[in-house]
Amino acid sequence: MAAAMKTSGGNNAYHNFHNDFIHIQDPNERRRLALAEVDKAPFGWYHVRAVVVAGVGFFTDSYDIFAVSLLTLMLGIVYYPGVGSMPTNSDTAIKLATSAGTVIGQLGFGSLADIVGRKRMYGLELIVIIFATLAQALASSSPSIDIIGVIIFWRVLMGVGIGGDYPLSSIITSEFATTKWRGAMMGAVFAMQGLGQLCAAFVMLFLTLGFKDSLETSSKPATCTGGCALAVDKMWRVLIGFGAVPGCIALYYRLTIPETPRYTFDVARDVEKAQDDVKAYINGKAEGTPDEVARATALRDTAATMTVPKASWADFFSHYSKLKNAKLLAGTALSWCFLDIAYYGVSLNNAVILQAIGYSTAGAHNTYEILYNTAVGNLIIVLAGAVPGYWVTVFTVDTVGRKPIQFMGFGILTVLFVVMGFAYWHLTPNGLLAIFVLAQFFFNFGPNATTFIVPGECFPTRYRSTSHGISAASGKIGSIIGQGAIAPLRTRGASPGNPNPWMDHVLEIYALFMLLGVFSTTLIPETKRKTLEELSGDDDYAASGNHPLVIPAQSSGSVTHEPATSDKRVADESA
């Protein structure tokens, strides 16, 4: 059998486990040893660094996505003088643009990560995000094109990059994580969303304080012209442009990660070509030219001995034609869809909701106070609700479990939205804000975190990224429904004295989808403390009892890795 060649990549955040077992000829045995090394590694700073590298991308994603509520508020002031706010259809179009691009990115990057590899795709999505974010911050209108159209274009492109980050960050963290704390690691990556939202709120607050003198010159947004409008124009550009900074910091680590050992063993299987491609790159050539005889021999031996099914369209459709697997994909996709209908419907409209309940406008005497109250209101929502919810999930998901947390979250959210909807006109602004903060907490100590974690664990390696992308794209389709079809209903029958007469009914509709999420949760499995192979049924050493042992060689004193088959264990016990 041809010897396997080393695979490329590796840095302080991601260890290359595949190369540790390169001397072992049997690919199935090498696979078991490498996966055992990953799954049973004690939690350490290596895992923390890996979480930070993946999490910085989610920090950037969240910052860019949820800053849109503040963005549309300021664009309305700058580009609609005399009115002070943009038309509802323009506001909705800008918010939908990111979600539309995200669906494309989740499906596209998700499938490509299974086809060409995680390593080749990771980092590319961050480049797209950085480029589109900076372009958006520098955008302007002209006689031939409106600023709204330009912003929509760049937010769609930014959404494509953000969409790619969902499956890639999830599965790469999952495939490098230790089994015992895999949920906490994936949860910590996703918890960076909360810090991204918090950062956007702080940046908005600091910008508002920085331009206080200019903003105080107008009594309300509709009269914010001249120096006031110039200040707000600078504010939204800095707010959006700052989102590219953390992405630039993480880019190097993303571009230099090694291929995950699970992908190398289960999907790629062609390590000869990988080694020659690295040599070619070092020598400035476009592509490597491996010895075709050695390559063909290695591929033939691998095909004859590897027990894991090879990825193909036929195998994909065969896999999901089984009721068990189809129900699993339906469970992850529908749960994410139902969640995002309500989550994005309210989270991307924080500024609108704060105005509707009278928090940001009540008692405000000028544009500065309105923007200041909006920034502080966002801080309260994120700091009191979202951020604690994320981290409570991180600390409990590997003990309580994914499924109980998701059940609980959907159930409590159903109750909260019912209360907000049916008692909307009877609650005080502070009472509504308190319930809204509670809803943010249970979104994140609940289905918003678990719908991200479970799809990264329960599918086979060869289709894990694609399946996660399908699940995530279903969520973003739900967010489009929530933002585009349901949230705008709040203005039905609007009048100057009551711009959001249907807000109560919108919240009642969201309650219905939270209830549907309770039922879709019954379709997903509990994944805590189980290996990825145990969950997907792909030749799992933990389930089969083929635990790897490390046995000292008698002749040279070197360490030899042997499979712990039942015969071997009997021989050892006899000795």
Image (cartoon, helix red, strand yellow):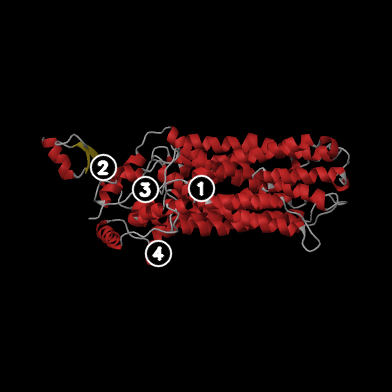
Q: Residues within 10 Å of mark 4 (few under 14, many from 20)?
A: few
Q: In the image, which is nearer the foreground, mark 3 or mark 2?
A: 3
- Residue 162 lies, in percent from the top left, at 58, 51
Residue type beneath disc 2: His
Q: Nearer the viewer, residue 354 or 501?
A: 354
Q: Would you name the residue on which mark 2 appears?
A: 547
Distance of label 3 from label 1 (alpha carbons): 22 Å
x and y percentages locating residue 261 in the rendered image: 37, 48
**In the displayed image of the protein, which residue is found farthest to the bottom?**
314
Residue behind mark 1: 452
Q: Are marks 1 and 2 in contact (CB under 8 Å)?
A: no
Residue picked out by circle 4: 321
Q: Is residue 445 visible?
A: no
Q: What residue does disc 3 label?
A: 261
Q: 441 or 147, which lies in front?
A: 147
At mark 1, the secondary structure is helix
- SS type, badge 2: loop
Quick one: quadrant of the N terminus?
bottom left
Q: Earlier in the sequence, mark 3 or mark 1?
A: 3
Q: In the depicted view, which residue is nearer to us: 270 or 37?
A: 270
